[in-house]
């Protein structure tokens, strides 16, 4: 007896991937439109050289999102955004260094939300690689 597995529609799947990539699309687009602010963000977090790193982040955020949304090497785009998010989370959201209070509370929440994004991207990569193996 064959068991039926529910398969989401391709449109629903693409919308879910778009939602997962939304922050990276918005971030990459905003950095590209206001490159000076992107450089200031790099300076704020002590990343140097600021201008080349800001450009690399823009390319990474938009390029990896495009890979995920088009399905072309989706696994690679997902792993790239997972690694980037994990690194950026530990650079920008070191809540354990903040004094107890509202700022620390909000930074801790954001830290763990970003870890959730990392998990989501790892699942996308795993699912894409599983699909390739099954084909």
Image: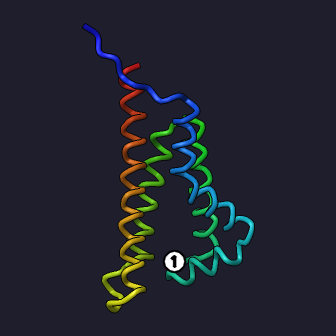
Q: Residue furthest bottom?
A: 99
> How many other residues sit within 10 Å of disc 1, few (<14), some (14-19) or many (≥20)?
some
Left or right, 66 with respect to 88, comes to right
Identify which residue is drawn at 54% across, 78% down.
48
Give the answer, above or below, for where 128 lies relative to 35.
above
79 or 19: nearer the viewer: 19
Say which residue appears at 47% left-offset and 43% top-offset. Answer: 76
The x, y position of residue 119, in whole percent, is 36, 52
Q: Secondary structure at mark 1?
A: loop
- Toward the viewer: 10 or 84? 10
Q: Quadrant of residue 90?
A: bottom left
Could you tell me if residue 72 is visible in this image? no
Give the residue number, with chain letter if any, for mark 1: 47
At x 47%, y 30%, the residue is 8
Q: Position of residue 99 (x, y in %)?
A: 34, 92
Q: Residue furthest top?
A: 1
Q: Quick one: quadrant of the N terminus?
A: top left
| Residue depicted at x 59% and y 76% | 50
**Quarter holding residue 70:** top right
């Amino acid at each position: 007896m064959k068991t039926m597995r529910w398969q989401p529609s391709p449109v629903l799947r693409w919308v879910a991937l778009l939602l997962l990539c939304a922050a990276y699309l918005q971030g990459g687009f905003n950095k590209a439109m206001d490159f000076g602010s992107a450089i200031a963000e790099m300076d704020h977090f002590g990343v140097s050289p600021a201008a080349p790193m800001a450009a690399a982040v823009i390319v990474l955020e938009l390029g990896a999102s495009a890979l995920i949304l088009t399905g072309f090497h989706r696994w690679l785009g997902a792993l790239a955004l997972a690694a980037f998010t994990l690194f950026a989370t530990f650079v920008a959201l070191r809540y354990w260094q903040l004094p107890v209070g509202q700022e620390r509370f909000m930074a801790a929440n954001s830290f763990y939300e970003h870890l959730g994004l990392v998990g989501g991207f790892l699942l996308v990569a795993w699912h894409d690689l599983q699909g390739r193996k099954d084909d």
